[in-house]
Amino acid sequence: MNLDQAVEMVSATDAGMVRSNNEDSVAFDASMGLAVLADGMGGYNAGEVASGMATAMIVSEMRSALAGSPSAATDVRGGGPAAQNLLRERIVRANASIYQASQSQPQYSGMGTTLVAALFHDNKVTVAHIGDSRLYRMRGQDLRQITKDHSLLQEQIDSGLITPEQARVSANKNLVTRALGIDSAVQPEIHDYDTQAGDLYLLCSDGLCDMVSDEDIGMALQTLAANLRLCAEQLVQMANDNGGRDNVSVMLVKIRRDYAAPRGLLARFFNWLK
Amino acid sequence: MAKLILSLDGLVLKEYALTKERTTIGRKPHNDVQIDNLAVSGEHAVIVTILNDSFLEDLGSTNGTLVNGQPVKKHFLQNNDVVEMGKYKLKFLSEQGGQAKTDFEKTMVLRPGAMQAAAAAAPRSFADTTVNQAPAALQAEEPAAPRRPEAASAQRIGMLQILTGGNAGKEMELTKPLTTMGKPGVQVAVITRRPQGYFITHVEGAQFPILNGKTLDAQAHALNDHDIVELAGVKMEFFFKA
């Protein structure tokens, strides 16, 4: 099933005002309904290598998994857990490749990346994330952070040590507790959420949410939803205007209309013919 | 390393470095910071330090703990906070106060177990002056610089006055980072407020905004004092507030 008509995706990424290189990577395929964003870390250009490997591998492997056999794709699209397993498998494989590269090549030693991936299917979105890259949802007037960071700061908030307001000025923003490619095993957090026509999803690296308040992010999404490209550029620009201390990447996904998976045998057959 | 400066009536008595994960404060001699005064409880408060962050917690003291004049039970200490117990004052100074670090907020992975390792390694390194044996991920970690400066508040405020149509004469202040104008679905433009000034950009619709008689393209255009904007047949003047 081609989601081209149902979801609209754009992305924007920038090195920011301070860093010389961009260690963020973004990749998407609107026809599959897949968006992947990664924020790499590690010396020299290893961060870029890790994030680039993660996004490219997940998108291309997902493409072959979904396009290889249409019937398998339909099954996958039909059931939530199937989509979760599919996504988890790609992430585990990407993790293995990055880890292997970092072990075998000294210049890549210790590289890793955060990840947030969203797979839209059957009026749902399956969200996987590792680290502090985030997914937000704008529904009507309401901006909500869907993912919860895997970071020391989030753990401090959860344990009641500090409030979210205090977290904004904390010095420990940069410590993530999970990452892709730093260990032989990885534990992505994966959940399903229902989508509605008109929803606007934002995937972003910490370069955006550290520099721009949720309130301003919400305002940009609200006022510029009609022009996604401009909206993405505006978000990057706001992060840079506020100092742009980190690489900033954003990806926007707008749900134009419903995209329920065909259920009946006949519908499946016609879908297969397409 | 963050530190505490103990003073009484403006007179500095002692300085304490927050090297331990738990720094206890109280009247009894076993405390790390001992204040021998009856207004101070035996075990009055504790400061828990995790990497760069320090948290103050009152341990149910009789006379309470104030931070910057406010009574607190639990408090996330900020640079220059003043903690009061009885007549004694403890000023908290964080290590990165005033330091400008170039490599800001490089994302690092904190592996499980690193915290315990760091907590174990830190006191050891101070006692024996051995090499800090914290894992590489922690050694490489840079303390973050203070938060970003707020957008220049001295920036001039732009205004928009509607010149034609039903709302002629109406004025609005452009104080928000984004202000949209026009009819959704027909023609919409946005005025963005940036440190460099104000910019107008086309958002949607077949018609593009007209600036001083010239039709704009899809790019953002800077707005100058007394520019005339035409949008969906309505003329507006942009100017800076006197």
Image: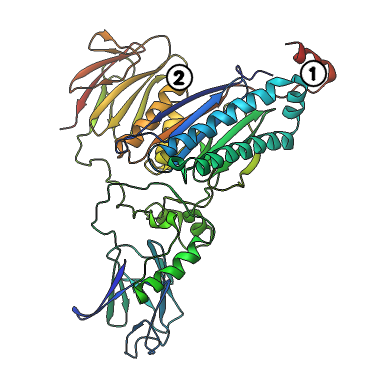
Q: Which labelled disc corresponds to residue A268?
A: 1
Q: Is residue A125 visible?
A: yes
Query: Could you tell me residue A135's position as x and y percent?
Result: 53, 38
Q: Chain of mark 2?
A: B
Residue B69, above or below B157: below
- Examine the rendered structure and indicate whether residue A30 appears above or below residue A49: above
Q: Quadrant of residue A119?
A: top right
- Number of marks present in the image shown: 2
For label 1, count other residues whose C-alpha is less than 10 Å away and answer few (under 14), some (14-19) or many (20+): some
Instruction: Label 2: state its secondary structure.
Output: loop
> Residue visible at 29% across and 38% down?
A18
Work out which quarter of the rendered image holds the C terminus of chain A and state it: top right
| Residue of label 2 | B184
**Three-letter amino acid code at disc 1?**
Arg
Determine if marks 1 and 2 fall on one subunit. no
Q: Residue at x 35, y 53 (%)?
A: B142
Using the image as rendered, state which of residue A153 and residue A131 is in the foreground. A131
User: Mark 2: which amino acid?
Assistant: Pro
Q: Residue A1 at x, y = what percent?
A: 69, 19
Residue at (31, 83) in percent of width and height: B86
Q: Disc 1 is attached to a residue of which chain?
A: A
A38 relative position to B42: left or right: right
